Amino acid sequence: MSDSNNAEILMAQPRGFCAGVDRAINIVNEALNRFGAPIYVRHEIVHNAYVVNELRDKGAVFVDELHEVPKGGIVVFSAHGVSQEVRKDAEARGLQVYDATCPLVTKVHLEVVKMCKEGFTVLMIGHAGHPEVEGTMGQVKEGVFLIEKLGDVSALPFSAEEKIAFVTQTTLSVDETKEIVEALTQKFPNIVQPRKQDICYATQNRQDAVKFMAPQVQVVIVVGSATSSNSNRLRELAEKLGVPAYMVDAPEQLKPEWFAGKKRVGLTAGASAPESLAQSIVSRIQEFGPRHVRALDGVVEDVTFSLPKNLVD
Ligand code: 0CJ
Ligand code: F3S
């Protein structure tokens, strides 16, 4: 590592928790405070190992499927949302549900339902197997088709005369989605778009912040877990901008050679990564050389979402 005392760490603005993640974690904490352990959570509440471990230590029990929750148990749905089938299953099992689906995901769910009711075929741009995609596509029984990449557009078996609309996952690459939307618009000139893009404000702002930071640094560290879609997009974006980028969710994962000879290190964090974890990663980077930490300019977010009514009443 360069022992250059003027080497520095530049912190992206904004980074880390979004309003939907903050709310989802608060819901689990509030349920634990009110009802005590165990509180079951379907899927990781957010895709971050540190957050999940911390809640597990307090008594949250993470399950993949609802049959793992005992009858009458309390279950929280994760920030990524669930299908109608999962909702019905919870009801049939007599579970007490607290829904931590991000309101911005619910907004997309409602678009899908509305479009299908109006007779549209709905195309969903997103990543196969991601819980948000399963939840959004699962708002209706049929009529939603997944597009994962640009190449999928030409293979779509619909004619330009059909009623077609699209929605997207909230955490996609803004630039890649734009390309897919352009191809869709070319193939289906009458395609109906969401009034405001489905990629959420937090995804957009964190990607914009990486675009601002990347040209100023020689390596980018993204704080985020491997399962986190939005964190992965930040790492890919930095690399596309020509800067080596690594994603970590614990300080021990940092390698000294990543920082060798680097005068400026950029740091950002996915929407599910806590600031305390980002700070412990900064401290570890400082052991490798760059001491000075500088906050970059960027958008200051003031979005907040209230807790579900059935939890605060
Ligand atoms: O899907 C969401 C509502 C985003 C939740 C926050 O981020 P994370 O990392 O849990 O989820 P993604 O894999 O969707 O980015
Ligand atoms: Fe919601 Fe966007 Fe966060 S959809 S959970 S505000 S990343």
Image: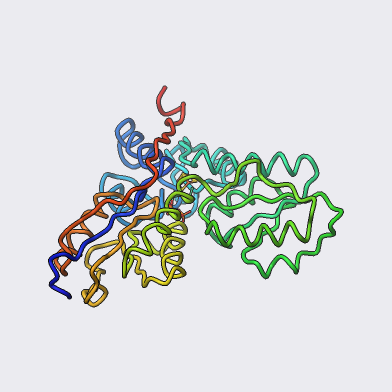
In this picture, residue 41 sits left or right of residue 91: left
Image coords of residue 309 (percent x, y): 46, 26
Residue sitting nearer the eye, 221 or 86: 221
In this picture, residue 68 sits left or right of residue 160: left
Image coords of residue 145 (percent x, y): 70, 57
Image coords of residue 36 (percent x, y): 30, 36
Most extreme residue toward the right is 161
Q: What colouring method underlies this structural image?
A: rainbow
Residue sitting nearer the eye, 32 or 211: 211
Image-quadrant location for residue 248: bottom left
Q: Is residue 95 above or below residue 65?
A: above
Residue sitting nearer the eye, 216 or 150: 216
Query: Taking the image as drawn, is residue 16 in sight?
Result: no
Q: Which residue sits at x=44%, y=49%?
A: 205
Q: Which residue sits at x=23%, y=69%?
A: 263
Q: In which quadrant will I find the N terminus?
A: bottom left
Q: Which residue sits at x=81%, y=60%?
A: 158
Q: Is residue 63 above or below residue 27?
A: below
